[in-house]
Image (cartoon, grey):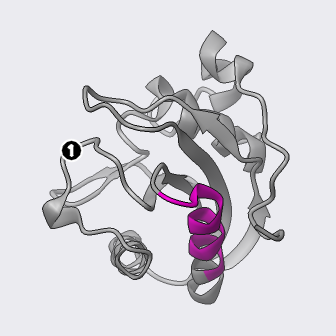
C-alpha cells in the first residue's frame, strides 16, 4: 500500500469544479486520508494564462507508482485534459501529479518521485505540507517544512473545500 500525495491544479473554466471532480474520481481509486486547502497561484512558464487553483490529497493506493500514474492520467482525460494538444506548462482544465510517496525515491522514463520540481514550486509544496506535515524529502532526509521558501509561506488558503459545494 502506497501513501502518496497527489497535487491537483486547474486554470481553465470552473477551476474549483475541476478540482472537486478530480478529487471525487481519485476517491474511487484510492483511500483519501486528508485534503489540503485550495490556493490560487501564478502559472509557471512563458505562456500567458489565468491563475491556477492548486490543492493536494494524501492518499493510500493499492498498487505500484506507475499504475497510480496511469489511473491519474485517465482521470485527467475524463476531466477534459488532452495532453497531446497542450502546450508545455500551458492552460489546462486539470493537472494531477504524484508529488511524493512515503519512503520512495525513483526515476524512470515516465515517472520521477518525488516530483522533480517540488521544492521549487510553492503551489505544490504548500499543499503537500498541509496534508502531510511530517513528510520528508527522501533524497536529502530534510522535512519539507524546512524546505519552504518565502513564496510558499505567503500562500493564503481560499475559502473553498475540495469536497464542498462548488
Q: Is residue 96 left or right of residue 3?
A: left
Q: Main secondary structure of the magenta part?
A: helix
Q: Which residues are magenta?
A: 13-24
Q: Is residue 24 left or right of residue 89?
A: right
Please report the residue visible at 28 percent of the width from the left and 41 percent of the height from the top: 89
Q: Return the residue nearer the eye: 52 or 95.
A: 52
Q: Residue 147 appears at what percent x and percent y?
A: 60, 21
Residue 1's place in the image compared with 100, above or below, is below
Q: Residue 165 appears at what percent x and percent y?
A: 82, 71
Residue 76's place in the image compared with 111, above or below, is below
Please report the residue visible at 68 percent of the width from the left and 61 percent of the height from the top: 58
Neighbour tally class for label 1: few under 14, some 14-19, many 20 plus, Cα within 10 Å: few
In this view, the residue farthest toward the front is 13
Asked which quadrant contains residue 152, the reply is top right
Asked which quadrant contains residue 27, the reply is bottom right
Q: Return the residue nearer the eye: 16 or 156.
A: 16
Q: Quadrant of the N terminus?
A: bottom right
Any part of residue 110 in sight: yes
Q: Return the residue nearer the eye: 164 or 139.
A: 164
Please report the residue visible at 60 percent of the width from the left and 26 percent of the height from the top: 142
Please report the residue visible at 56 percent of the width from the left and 72 percent of the height from the top: 22
Does the stretch in magenta take in 16?
A: yes
Query: Mark 1 — residue?
Result: 88
Asked which quadrant contains residue 145, the reply is top right
Does the stretch in magenta take in 120?
A: no
Q: Is residue 105 left or right of residue 3?
A: left
Amino acid at each position: 500500500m502506497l501513501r502518496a500525495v497527489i497535487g491537483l491544479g486547474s486554470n481553465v473554466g470552473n477551476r474549483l469544479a475541476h478540482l472537486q471532480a478530480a478529487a471525487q474520481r481519485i476517491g474511487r481509486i484510492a483511500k483519501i486520508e486528508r485534503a489540503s486547502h485550495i490556493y490560487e497561484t501564478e502559472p509557471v512558464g512563458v505562456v500567458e494564462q489565468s491563475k491556477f487553483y492548486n490543492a493536494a490529497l494524501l492518499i493510500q493506493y493499492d498498487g505500484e507508482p506507475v499504475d497510480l500514474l496511469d489511473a491519474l492520467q485517465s482521470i485527467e482525460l475524463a476531466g477534459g485534459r488532452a495532453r497531446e494538444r497542450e502546450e508545455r506548462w500551458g492552460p489546462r482544465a486539470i493537472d494531477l501529479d504524484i508529488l511524493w510517496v512515503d519512503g520512495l525515491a525513483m526515476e524512470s522514463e515516465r515517472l520521477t518521485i518525488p516530483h522533480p520540481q517540488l521544492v521549487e514550486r510553492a503551489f505544490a509544496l504548500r499543499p503537500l505540507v498541509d496534508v502531510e506535515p511530517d513528510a520528508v524529502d527522501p533524497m536529502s532526509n530534510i522535512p519539507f517544512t524546512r524546505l519552504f521558501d518565502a513564496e510558499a509561506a505567503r500562500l493564503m488558503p481560499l475559502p473553498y473545500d475540495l469536497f464542498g459545494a462548488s
